[in-house]
Amino acid sequence: MITAVDSNVLLDVFLADKTHGQRSAALLRISMKEGRVVACDAVSAEVCAVFPSPDEAGAALDRLGIVFDPISETAASAAGASWHRYRSRDGTATPERGLDSFRAEGSSGMAFPQGVLEPTLLSGGP
């Protein structure tokens, strides 16, 4: 399986977020055991912004085994449509943590939403 990770999950880990850091790290470890973890171009840019240099950000991602995989227009559209359907089911207009909790599965360069990690899972507890 391929899991696409969002910057919020990575930043929780890299910045040792007191609220979400441990749970995000645990979910990241689970995803790594299940297969490859990828970060798209937007995630890479957002992660680079919190490091002193792009090289240091790249090294941190490499240490975690996160693979850079730029998103295609087709993948972005599929993820957006799936996110819209998910948010429409419960009538909530504003996501608590947004697409950061959305996992995608598929071949390189093509993302297909697999499911949603509920925001409560990211906020603590086993």
Image: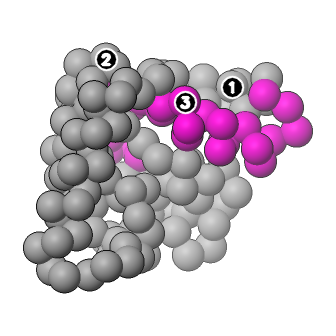
Q: Are marks 3 and 2 in contact (CB under 8 Å)?
A: no
Say few, some or many: other residues with alpha carbon within 10 Å of mark 2 (under 14 / 14 to 19 / 20 or more): some
Mark 1 lies on residue: 58
Q: Nearer the viewer, mark 3 or mark 1?
A: 3
Q: In percent of the image, x 55 and y 63: which residue is there? A: 21
Where disc 3 sits, the SS reads: helix
Disc on res. 41 = 3
Distance between the alpha carbons at the discs numbered 3 and 1: 12 Å
**Disc 3 marks which amino acid?**
Asp
* Residue lying at 70% horizontally and 25% vertically, measured from the top left: 59
The reply, left or right, for residue 72 in relation to residue 92 is right
Crowding at dot 3, Cα within 10 Å, few <14 / some 14-19 / many 20+, comes out as some
Magenta stretch encompasses residue 109: no
The residue segment tinted magenta is: 28-54
Q: Residue at the spot x=60%, y=34% of the render?
A: 44
Q: Nearer the viewer, residue 72 or 31?
A: 72
Dot 2 or dot 1: first in sequence order is 1
Distance from the alpha carbon under mark 3 to that under mark 2: 13 Å
For the residue pair 91 and 50, the one nearer the viewer reads as 91
User: Which quadrant is home to the N terminus?
Assistant: top left
**Of the residues shown, which amino acid type is indicated by label 1?**
Gly
Q: Residue at x 16, y 44 (%)?
A: 114
Residue 33 visible, this angle: no
Tag of residue 108 = 2
Q: Is residue 77 above or below residue 1?
A: below
Residue 72 vs residue 16, the one in the foreground: 72
Specify whether 70 is left or right of 11: left
User: Which tag is nearer the camera, tag 2 or tag 1?
Assistant: 2
The image quarter containing residue 29 is: top left
